[in-house]
Amino acid sequence: MIAGMTAGVRQEPREAACPRTPWRHRLPVLLALLVGVAGVGYRLALLLADAPPTNSDEATMGLAALHIARGQDFPVWFYGQAYMGTLEAYLAAPLVALAGPSVLVLRLPTLALYALFLALSWRLTRRLRGDRWFALLVVGFLALGSDRVIKNQLIAGGGYPELNPAGVALALLTVGLCAGASGRCAGGSGRCASGPGRCAGGSGRCAGGSGRPTSSRAAPPGPGERAVDADPSRLRAGARLLRWAAWGLVSGLMLWVDPLLLPYVLGTGAVLVARRRRELAGRAGLVVVTALLLGAAPMLLDSLRHGRNPLAAVLAAGGGDAAAGWGERLYGGLVLGPPLGMGFCSPSHCAGWQLWWAVAFPLLLLLAALAAWRTLRTRSPGGLPDDAGTGTPAGGAAGELGHVPFGQDGKCPRSGQLTGGDDRWVSAAVRLALLAGAAAVLLAYTVSSAAGQTPVESARYLSCLAVATPALLWPLWQLPFPRQVGDLAVSGSAGHHHLADVELISAEPAGERGPAEGGRRVRVAALAAVAVLAATLGTAGVATAGSIARVPAVHAEADRHRALVDTLGELGVRHVRGGYWTCNRLTFATGEDVVCAVVDDELRPGFDRLPAYRRAVAADPGAAWVAPVGSPLAARLDQRLGPDSGALDVVTVAGWRVYLPRP
């Protein structure tokens, strides 16, 4: 009876079971996890120490979050302008409702966005065929944080903290949609091809032992055996549509939040059209368009309702109507821009030796683009058609039993991992899209007047260059010596067992220049790559140390501002006038208990992002004045001090002067 019950059950040989990953292969993963935790911990420690310094623009986003939490207002744009969506305010509003207004509460969502950026960058690097050690390098670089980089990542001032995770997410979704692996064994049946005890597909079954041919039709299950769907692509169709929807939604949201990411949207979109145009002609295209319109709905509805043009507002904000010489623009954009934007400079300035990245950046951009283009030229997508948009390579595996895909380390490939003949093309195409996006961002910044007028502060427009980090550093890691370092750490030998996937940057055959000369050139190039990698991490590390050194001063300034808030509360002041960089910061810090109207240094009305504040202050004859000690506004107000009626009394507290009108 027992024999009859087990006759239909397939027996799997124990020796064919998938081997566990050795600890040496897990080492870079564990190190990357530790480095990522250190990067997030470093930023959390900065937040707890009131760094980076806040300002009135961030407080304006905080006021939007406060109004959303109270149900008073649901702004589409950053107050006082018709561009830069308020996504950060909506993310922070639940926390503000629970814990009240504070800079720390406002920045917790941006910290979470940074952690997501690190995790997605690791995943993207691996999906682009980078090994674990290269992914560790990318995470290590992104874990560092200079003054400019930390400000871009943590300050909730609108339009910057969300750009990097969104850009990497778009690239990652593009890889998954273009690769289209079903995560099953060849042929889509979920069964295994015959082979020498290798793992195939995501089912955990192993080839070998049975010698049973793989077919696109699943055999009926035996007694006591779990049924296998005969058409796994049908089960995957819903998941693919969700990916298409996610790509469209993220793209639409970023168009609303900040169009700085538009080059990456266009680049990854071009890859999808080139690789999945047949699928986009069907339901996938409808899903993408619908999700994109949904993400951009706040911008589109506001534009239709008020007749606004967000693009014109963005161009005006970039200095399109201001004067700046081309020499200043080129210097600010091409010389100062890359080092500042990618975290190689000291706080508020770039030392001469830190500008070496201005030369290395375009060279790496060119080398990486040439390597990716060469791969695209040798592996055209035309020879790798997709099967009616399902993502399964045409022809299946019924006729290619000897080509069951495996992971880069000979292990079972995970669901969606790039395998088969199209993996290099997809990797190269996405890397080229990232590089093109980075080049377009830099070009757009360079031609703007902001690059010439305020190059240090305006370098925030280059924050999304970090999205292209895996593609930018790619050519340095593909040379033999840097990869040998990872191989040595993993296997104990500096072999080249992974070098079959290396894309040679030089197109000149080694035989034409002689083996000895070719070997010397490769060694020189490899040593140069190691030097550039070491200089990259070293320079970013020095810039990070400079940012840490400023923390005590930033914390002291935040303490002085808290003392000002306490003093105004003790004095019973509810309405004040002050400079632009004083007003909204003070209003947010007090939860609108103190309302401030902006004035310039000559006591004339300034730019109030919320006009209601000016009206409230104007209605109070006893409104006070607030100015930092030693500022031009304080000097102007000092002239109005005196014993007469209508003159001002002054209270000095921790670097601030509070001017009270005499009755």
Image (cartoon, helix red, strand yellow):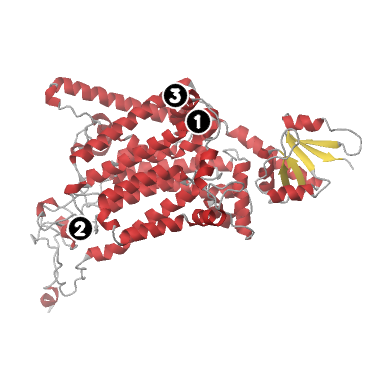
Residue neighbourhood size for the residue with mark 1, other residues' Cα within 10 Å, grouped as few (<14), some (14–19), many (≥20):
many
Number of callouts: 3
**Which percent across, then down, holds residue 302?**
54, 55
Residue, disc 3: 355
Q: Residue type at mark 2: give it.
A: Asp
Earlier along the polypeptide chain: callout 3 or callout 2? 3
Distance, label 3 to label 2, CA atoms, is: 49 Å
Marks 2 and 1, how far apart at CA: 48 Å
- Quick check: marks 1 and 3 in contact, CB under 8 Å? no
The earlier-in-sequence mark between 2 and 1 is 2
Residue pointed to by mark 1: 451
Farthest residue in the bottom direction?
1
Point out the residue furthest to the right here: 644
* Label 3: which secondary element: helix
- Badges 3 and 2: C-beta atoms under 8 Å apart? no
Task: Provide residue 33's location: percent of width, then percent of height.
Answer: 39, 44
Which residue is drawn at the image coordinates 19% and 42% (left, top)?
379
Q: Amino acid at mark 3?
A: Leu
Residue at 64% over, 59% down: 72
Distance from the alpha carbon under mark 1 to that under mark 3: 16 Å
Residue 209: mark: none
Quadrant housing residue 529: top left
**Residue 204 location in percent, x, y?**
22, 59
- The mark closer to the camera, 3 or 2, is 2
Which residue is more in the foreground, 100 or 313? 313
654 on left or right of 549: right
Q: Amino acid at mark 1?
A: Ala
